[in-house]
Amino acid sequence: MKNSFSKAVFSFKTGILKPKLEDLFQESESILGTKDVSILNFKKRQVLLKHALEHSSFYKKKYQGLNLDDEGLQRPEDFLKIPPLTRPELQANFDAIKADNVAPSHYRKVTTSGSTGFPVSTLQDRRHPETPIRWRILQWWGIKPWENQAFVYRFNKGFIERFKNKLLWWPTKRIFLAAANPSAGQLHSFITDFNRIKPTLLQGYVDVMFEFALYLLDNNIKIHPPKMVWVTSAPLFEEQRELMEKAFGASVCDQYGNTEIPLIAAECPAQQGLHIMQDTVHIEFVDENNRPVPPNTTGKILLTDLTNFAFPLIRYEIGDEGKYLERACSCGRPLSLMDNVRGRRAVIIETPSGLSIRGEHIMAMFDGYMKLFKEIQLHQEPDFSVCIHYVPRNVDQGTEAVEKMAELLRQRSRTEILIRFEETQKIKRVNKKTPLIISHLR
């Protein structure tokens, strides 16, 4: 009865405030059921490219000589001839990339955190919100958007923001925990509220969710199991997943997205890889020459937002690495799979001889030890030496494990660099994120 009332109020408010959302959601679901998504994906790229050539002065200039004005995009392989959009280009050409035929009311400006370099700004097209894709992912896990939800953030929301959120979502209950040094009282209050409202969804950044999970385990505290735990914004160690699932009593859904394109791929309950939202985004995994790499092979990621006509992002080199998975998911959904993103390609450990150690390799090396730590972070200094900063779960744990981790990294670097380690109380945050690697080489 209570759920029916929440659904009715939610549907009424959605129909008044954002009447197109339900239509967009139903349209997105029908696409997966009745069409070849790869064909639809290519058609959307054709439309987007034509729009960019007509309404973005940046793309008109960038694509000169490609004969795209007359012929357009004829075959999928022709898309590979288009030069990628780099982050420096995006930073330097914001006004030129913006489409000249979109009213200001149809977009909003967003800016990245700049955790791995200078921040960049883009526009998100309000006419094509991410909400229907969010509903799609929640539906996979049996969660309705009007059910109670809980969130673990790094910083506290202000009173006005919390009041607006409460008013907007009533009678659905949404609770928030600011995980940046929460007091015992704040943790107790959040856990009490959590068990009272019994949210079906618990969501947050990987590192703060892991920290909350460790608090529950270390203090033997039980919470009402949600239907799913949604984590994002950082690489997920498998040991972190295992401990979170134990603490929360629910499966963890890993999701890939960023400020520029929030919902790119996500896991379904089968957890056999991340389903790519091919009807709203085109993703490529390419080599240094921007040619496709084979399935199951790591490559740099290029993204094309198929729904953003206010600020076209075409073959955008985001700075991440990932790979297609050749297998199909046992769930039967017609969306290709990608592996969990393990880190940014721009942030690596380097040696004086030019050897590069990527974040995904470091994660694989360290994965057997993460249960002993709340957080770890690698700092590479200008002299190439690396310090492993770590926060142990318990005072008498971690030293032996971090010694082994240091030796593994020393061997992987062919003993070219000095590896040391240092216990700390808190890992360094870069804006709102906690990167695995911080490099001071340049």
Image (cartoon, rainbow, N blue to C red):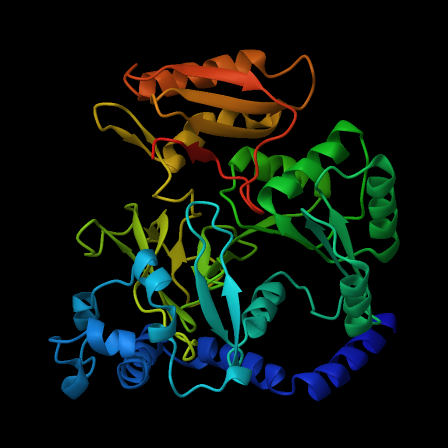
Is 52 situated above or below 377?
Answer: below
Name the residue at 51% across, 37% down.
237
Residue 367 visible in the shown view: no
The answer to whether residue 79 is left or right of residue 322 is: left
Name the quarter where the C terminus is drawn.
top left
The x, y position of residue 226, in whole percent, is 73, 52
Name the residue at 83% across, 47% down.
190
The answer to whether residue 207 is left or right of residue 85 is: right
Name the residue at 52% across, 65% down.
110
Residue 395 visible in the shown view: yes
Residue closest to the eye, 140 or 149: 149
Instruction: Choose top left, top right, bottom left or bottom right for residue 138.
Output: bottom right
Name the residue at 40% across, 49% down.
339
Instruction: Choose top left, top right, bottom left or bottom right for residue 337.
Output: bottom left
The x, y position of residue 118, in whole percent, is 42, 50
Number of marks present in the image shown: 0
The x, y position of residue 119, in whole percent, is 45, 54
The x, y position of residue 403, in whole percent, is 49, 13
Name the quarter where the N terminus is drawn.
bottom right
Residue closest to the eye, 54 or 409: 54
Residue closest to the eye, 348 or 412: 348
